[in-house]
Image (cartoon, rainbow, N blue to C red):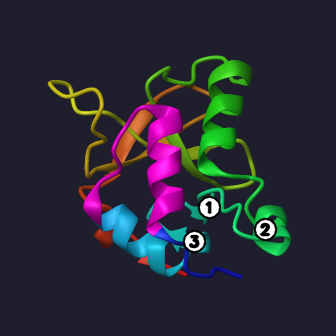
């Protein structure tokens, strides 16, 4: 069940990953740290921002964006090294954000689907605000 998260935990994740998240994603996640989205491709469970404010939140956010991104970068052949994993369909495919070409420390507003079988990345929404929040 999604729940709000303090912006300081979002900022901590940005520091860990060395990127800034797009405003629409930050706004949505600040209200519902986790949850799910439905796209034309599939439904995805969103990874939360790690929240260390208390034991219950630590347990509920241990599958955090930074942890899952690190895991994908280290464990999945063909996962784009610069991508940030924000969700999973449970079958291996990931919902990702990619950095801007001219500003690699800032993530694009576009939301992408990474296909674990082909390694291809496909734009599925021009902005996080366009995905159907579950």
Whether residue 21 is in magenta: the answer is: yes
Horizontal side of 35 relative to 25 (left or right) equals: right
Kindly check if marks 3 and 1 are in contact, taking CB atoms under 8 A apart as contact. yes
Gap between marks 1 and 2 measured at Cα: 8 Å
In the depicted view, which residue is nearer to us: 85 or 106? 106
Q: Secondary structure at mark 2?
A: helix
Counting residues from the N terminus, which is met first, the one under dot 2 or under dot 3? 3
Horizontal side of 38 relative to 24 (left or right) equals: right
In the depicted view, which residue is nearer to us: 69 or 130? 69
Quadrant of image for the N terminus: bottom right
Give the residue number, with chain letter if any, for mark 1. 48
Picture layout, residue 132 above or below residue 64: below
Magenta part of the protein: which range?
7-23
Residue 41, given in percent of the width and then of the height, sits at 49, 57
Kindly check if marks 1 and 2 are in contact, taking CB atoms under 8 A apart as contact. yes
Gap between marks 2 and 3 measured at Cα: 10 Å
Residue 74, given in percent of the width and then of the height, sits at 69, 20
Residue 33's disc number: 3
- Magenta portion: prevailing SS class: helix
């Amino acid at each position: 069940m999604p729940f709000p998260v303090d912006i300081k935990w979002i900022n901590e994740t940005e520091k860990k990953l060395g990127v800034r998240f797009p405003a629409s994603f930050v706004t949505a996640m600040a209200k519902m740290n986790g949850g799910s989205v439905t796209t034309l491709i599939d439904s995805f469970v969103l990874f939360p921002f790690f929240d260390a404010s208390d034991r219950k939140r630590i347990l509920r956010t241990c599958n955090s964006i930074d942890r899952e991104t690190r895991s994908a970068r280290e464990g999945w052949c063909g996962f784009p090294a610069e991508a940030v994993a924000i969700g999973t369909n449970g079958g291996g495919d990931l919902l990702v954000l990619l950095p801007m070409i001219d500003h690699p420390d800032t993530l694009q507003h576009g939301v992408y689907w990474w296909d674990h079988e082909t390694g291809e990345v496909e734009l599925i929404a021009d902005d996080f605000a366009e995905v159907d929040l579950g």
